[in-house]
Every structure is written in structure tokens, then in C-alpha cells.
Image (cartoon, rainbow, N blue to C red):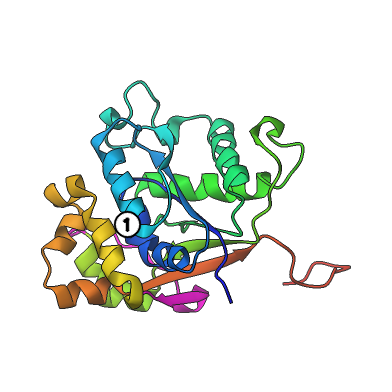
Amino acid sequence: MSLPSLLAVFAHPDDESLSAGGVLARHAADGARTAVVTATWAEDTRRAAELADALRILGAGEPRMLGYADARVPQSAPGSVRFRDAPLDESVRRLVTHIREVRPEIVVTHDAYGGLTGHPDHVHTHRVTTLAVEAAGLDHLYPDAGIPWRPSALYLATHPHSAAQALGARLVRENGAMYSVPDEWVTATVDVRPWLERKISAVFAHRTEVERGALPGRLAGLPPADRERLMSTEWYIRRDLVPTAATQTQLTP
């Protein structure tokens, strides 16, 4: 059975490789269409060039960038507003355009916490993506953004409590807050070891983050066995966008 087409939507260059690099590589290797939308940073920046390198490694096409500024790095998109400060309707419309152009069967993004760190750009990307996947299928919303398209499912990249307790201290800065979800909320636990070499190469393609000691840099400094243990599993929460149950005559839990 062939894997479905996939569009990943993440906040910053490197989030796609860290959060879903294994799944992206797996789907691309199977011949599925894969693409990535990145909410922040401008196309003519170093980090955009690094993103292009990472996506080539993963087989996920060319960068698709919404062009907003990182909440903590104003120079990431000179002349553009911070992603969190942009009008919500405008951000949703921009993302709807990409969804309708790519026409993915599934969309992947951050969970409602914004992952382990709770970065505000991650949280906002979750909000914008959940609105855009619904809006993309509605004829009368953003009619100038392309032919309507309704993905079948939205997957939220997350960490269960058990994994966060076992691994999280190596991924979050000392004394930083750490966000995870109950284990039973996780609906897809993906072993990405067959694609791990590609995932790690994509993470390290974000050389700016390696050099400044951000998460890719901390991973680069680990012994290979520890790094593989941290990166060999990806967890997701599924949200169905197409009805799977029979039509109801009342609301049920």
C-alpha cells in the first residue's frame, strides 16, 4: 500500500526536520508527494538556504515560506511583521493557498502546546494550520486562493509524557518548561529508524542552529547512540477532517 501525500506546516526552518523528518523522508522514499510550508524567515536569508538543503535531503521539494518574522528574531524577515502579530485572516489565507496548490491527503503540524518547548511561534502555527485545513475545503472561503481541497486528516507532532520524562531533559534547555500529552492521546507512534540517517542529515543541514548551540547543535554534540535514541521515534495525534462515522441524529461523545 502506497503512502499518502503529505504537507508539513511548521514555524521555523529546522522544525520540519526535528519534528517530522523521519515521516517526511519515509513518504518521499515511497514516492508520495511531500512538501513543507514554513511560517517564518524570509526567502533570501541564510536559514532559508539551509532549509532548501534540508528539504532536498528529505525529498520534500522546494521551500514554501509564508515570510513572517520569527517572534524572537526581527531580522529574520526585514520589513515583515512577526508571525504572531499578523492578521489571522491573512495568515490563514496564505496557508490555504499552499494547501490548495499541494492538495495533500494529510497535513502535519505542531500540537497545541507547540511541542516540548512551547515556543510561541509553534503554538501560533498550530492555530493557523487547524483553521486553514478546514477553510481550504470550503468554496466560499478565500475563493481567490485556488480550487477548494479538503485533506483527510491532520496530524499533530507531539511527545507523550513517558517519552518526555525519558528523553525530554536532553532536548529542552536547562530549567526550561517542558510540555507533553498523556500517552493515550497519541494515535501514531512511528519508528523512523530506517530513515534516521536522512533525518539526522537534514537536521544538521540547518548549520546556523548547529553553530549557535540550538537543538540541532545540542544533538550534534551527543554520542551517536544517544542521538539515535532521541530521534528514532516520532509521535502524532490524529484529527480526522473527513467524516468516518455514520450520520448521527444527535450529538454523542
Look at the picture and state if 13 lies above or below 216.
above
| Residue toward you, 100 or 178 | 100
Q: Residue at x 28, y 57 (%)?
A: 202
The image position of residue 128, as x and y in percent, is 53, 44
Choose between 118 and 242: the one closer to the eye. 242
Query: From the viewer's perspective, is residue 190 above or below residue 61?
Result: below
Residue 132 appears in which quarter of the rendering?
top right
State which quarter of the image contains the N terminus: bottom right
Q: Residues within 10 Å of mark 1 (few under 14, many from 20)?
A: many
Q: Specify start and end residues of the magenta stretch as a single range.
A: 173-192
Type of the residue with mark 1: Ile
| Residue occupying the point 18% across, 45% down | 208
219 vs 184, nearest the viewer: 219
Looking at the picture, tell me which residue is in the foreground, 156 or 3: 3
Asked if residue 62 is positioned above or below residue 157 in the image, the reply reads: above
Q: Secondary structure at mark 1?
A: helix
Residue holding disc 1: 57
Q: Where does the image place residue 197, in percent across and percent down from the top left?
A: 26, 69
Point 50% across, 79% down: residue: 184
Residue 204: x, y in percent? 21, 56
| Residue 42 is covered by the magenta coloring | no
| Viewer can see residue 16 | yes
x, y percent for residue 156: 49, 61
